Image: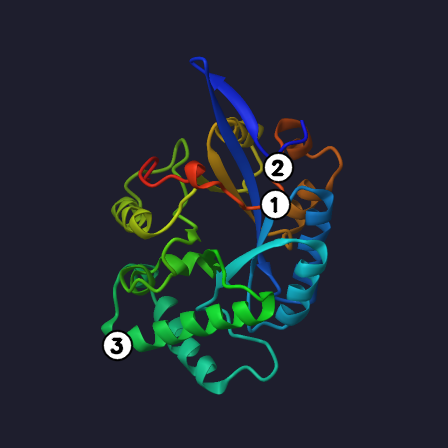
Amino acid sequence: MSADKLIHRIDGQSRSGLLIVNADDWGRDPFTTGRILDCARQGTVSSVSAMVFMKDSERAAAVAQEWGIDAGLHLNFTTPFSAPHCPAQLVEHQRKLARYLLRHPIARAVFHPGLVRSFGYVVAAQIDEFRRLYEKPPDRLDGHHHMHLCANVVLGGLLPKGTIVRRHFSYEPGEKALRNGIFRQFTNALLSQRHRLVDYFFSLPPLEPPNRLERIFSLASRNAVELETHPVNPKEYKFLIERDSPLDSAQVVASSFAVPQERCSNQRHAP
């Protein structure tokens, strides 16, 4: 099967599905970028989430354009910017945010009035830098360590309206539904009012047991599913790069993150 879409017939109706394998941290450093590029060339990565103001951001943007790699913006509030000549003011604002967000796990769920200016500045600076590097504004955004879902970003409306934004992880069998459940549902509901969301979002690992990925592949036959991966992790890289990867036999991987409007969920699967 060669198309990006799989057609699954249910009750006599055709429904399209997408399996989007998105690699995070593009541009963080040359090694990380290289690992992701290997997987993209192998056809097991659909798209990347690009970091800006990092050591390899400039080169990675040129590589993405050369190879036609679909890139979105990977907002970074917690890992120090490593690009040469990064503006001192930006470094200082990010340092404030990292100190707050990493202080306690619950910090991301609490709106901090004293950091409104810093959040706004750091988000706007990264959007502007992405536009400079990729010669277009980002139409898709997520966050390093998923910090784009923190209260100051979501409640502050800092993400451009109408863009595709990564939702919270979807629940999996055996997971405690009450863990962060209220925060997840509340955030997803807010996101759905301003942004386009895929139906389901999972991490590629754990790779075992095999029936976990089989269940996700099954969901992708009739829903838009995003799989997050970090090919810099040796186990994930091996899984993605091997010729007999389950991705080759179980499902067609989308060639980009170009999810049609009708395939984006606004209300379904809110957890």
Task: Please state the horizontal and vertical placement of residue 163, each as a whole percent of the image.
Answer: 42, 54
At label 2, the amino acid type is Val
Check disc 3 and report its element: helix, strand or loop. Answer: helix
At label 1, the amino acid type is Ser
Check disc 1 and report its element: helix, strand or loop. Answer: loop
217 sits left or right of 176 in the view? right
- Observer-side mark, 2 or 3, equals 2
Which residue is painted at 40% across and 60% down in the image?
A: 147
Crowding at mark 3 (Cα within 10 Å: few <14, some 14-19, many 20+): few
Q: Which residue is mark 2?
A: 253
Crowding at mark 2 (Cα within 10 Å: few <14, some 14-19, many 20+): many
Q: Which mark is residue 10?
A: none
Task: Please state the horizontal and vertical placement of residue 178, each as a whole percent of the image.
Answer: 28, 41
Q: Nearer the viewer, residue 59 or 99?
A: 59
Alpha carbon distance from label 3 to label 1: 38 Å
Q: Quadrant of the N terminus?
A: top right
> Is the C-beta separation of discs 2 and 1 under 8 Å?
yes
Q: Which mark is residue 46?
A: 1
* Mark nearer the N terminus (2 vs 3): 3
At label 3, the amino acid type is Gly
Q: Quadrant of the C terminus?
A: top left
Task: Please state the horizontal and vertical placement of residue 245, each as a whole percent of the image.
Answer: 69, 35
Q: Residue furthest right?
A: 243
Q: Which mark is residue 114?
A: 3
* Mark nearer the N terminus (3 vs 1): 1
Check disc 2 and report its element: helix, strand or loop. Answer: loop
Alpha carbon distance from label 2 to label 1: 7 Å
Task: Please state the horizontal and vertical placement of residue 80, each as a whole percent of the image.
Answer: 51, 74
- The answer to whether one can see residue 68 in this image is yes
